Amino acid sequence: MTVSQLSIFAESKPGHLARVLGVFEGAQVNVRGFSLADTGEYGITRFIVDKPAAAAEALAREGFAYIETQVVCMKLDDEPGQLARVVAVLGKADLNIVYSYSMISTYIIIGTDDAERARCLLAEAGFSLVTQADIARASAERLSAQG
Amino acid sequence: MIAAAQAGRFDDLPLYDRAIETMPREELRALQLAKLKEQVAYTYQKVEHYRHLMDQMGVTPDDIRTLDDIRKLPFTDKSTLRDTYPYGLFAVDLDDIIELHASSGTTGTPIVVGYTRADMDVWSDCIARLVQMAGVVPGDIAQMAFGYGMFTGGFGLHYGLQKLGCAMIPAGSGNTERHIKMIEDYGTTVLIATPSYAMHICEVGEQMGYDWEASSLRVGLFGGEPCPPALKAELERRMHIVCTDNYGLTEVMGPGVSGECLAQRFQQHIAEDHFLAEVVDPVTGEPVAEDQVGELVLTPLDKQGIPVLRYRTHDLTRLTTEPCVCGRTHARMDKVRSRSDDMLIIRGTNVFPSQIEDVLAGIDEVTPHYHIIVETKDGMDALTVETELRPEKMSDSFEQMERMRRTIADKLKGTLLVGVNVRLVEPGGIQRTTGKAKHIDDLRQR
């Protein structure tokens, strides 16, 4: 199972990220991980959230340019060499990593041209893959722990 | 009525003043000549500025024997109205003036114009004619989204629509959400706005969840700024209305000089019984042939308050007198897409904003909104075009986004023949305005 990522067009100007996050807050969407990348003139901000459908709906309503894509998320053991193993698996299969970022310490997001294939390769190599449900659950558990 | 136009049944469409609007061209020209002779005599007699100029040139009103003789007369430029500000060109006592208007002053000192009761009658007549031509019928409910005030657009359309028999809602510009509520509550059928403000109303309505398809709104009347064809098409599609735009300028009257009929969507019929139109080479001032692009020069034929002669509009267009399927015989001008004075010279090449509009209109990934920035970089002119990404064209890949940006830049370069930096901005990122849209920032060091 791959996970949904929301990639949002961002002009490089102050206040843009605040506007996006305001929309998420208004829709009661919790951000579980994100990455900002920029060309100097514009950028792509990528988000992993607990409720991708609600987030997408809120973004559309506010007129943002965004796209929902599938990426792979896996939980690595917190020890040396783990990330190296991941990239080795994909490299050996000639699957290019277009971008990658970490979510929560050892939760690593990887974007490729073929998310499903990357997922299979990494699952076969024994990595612990994170699902959308896991992400939602983590958010819900934290809330109930607070509650 | 609009259905009849779409089906090509133009015979079914009502005309506001059939006798004048379908007058055979020979008769129309005879009418123009008779009016021109009177108008030149009136102007010579009443306005010192013109009497002085014509005396210097050795021309008298008796020298006007044919319509072509108008070329013997001096041109009038905006600077003449500024130099004689406020009342220097007025031909009547202020007692006879019943309304004053001023230009928006976007390009310098404002100018002021005055209308007699007879001028107001002609003006509202011209408007009634053009709104009928655009699909408005008596009984329509017309909502004004132009600002009123000194700008000629607001009151000009207001009086003309009333003259045709419409109920006016004088909402004025701004407070977009209230506009949408009024359309809904009052059953508005006609919206008068600048095209860029109409787009803003459309977008705000969509965000509020207003259903434009189910709306009572039927007709959009646009003016105040040029309306790019792609923007018009988009408004028609999204708001489910028929949009036309009309042309005019404060210096010769205001809106009402020409308007679009439902048969020719890229041209406008000139009210030739009230205006004599010439097209001249913007540099030499010499006439160009019919169908050739040049600067529009207008002479109002029965204006009493300020009777300007040969007003240089700086608007580039061309005229045709070919018969129109709508039945009107009055000449058509191409919609004004560019002005002789907003031509940009980039590294020695002439660039018109309308060329940029046309290229962007052919690109699916972006909206028709744009903004041009010209700067000096390393001693050279650098042209940047900002364009809005359409929400659904977003990609997760910089490679694809950059490819899109380069494709747009290449297409622009292919048409403009100068290199362009394209900057993608987010949807809604280009400012929409209620007045004249500001498309160009020229920041070059002079």
Image: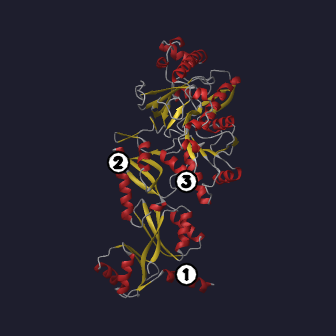
Give the residue pinned by disc 1.
A139
> Measured from the top left, where is residue B178 in percent x and y?
67, 53
Observer-nearest of A46 and A71: A71
Give the residue pinned by disc 3.
B238
Which chain's residue wears label 1?
A
Quarter containing the N terminus of chain B: top right
Along the polypeptide, which appears first: circle 2 or circle 3? Answer: 3
Give the residue pinned by disc 2.
B413
In the depicted structure, whether residue B125 falls above or below residue A80 = above
Q: Residue at x 52, y 12 (%)?
A: B60
In the depicted structure, whether residue A121 falls above or below residue B227 = below
In the image, what residue type sits under mark 1? Ser
In the depicted structure, whether residue B248 falls above or below residue B205 = above
C-alpha separation, residue under disc 2 versus residue under disc 3: 30 Å
Total tally of numbered discs in the picture: 3
Quarter containing the C terminus of chain B: top left
Q: Are marks 2 and 1 on the same chain?
A: no
Residue B125 seen in the figure: yes
Q: Residue at x 36, y 44 (%)?
A: B416
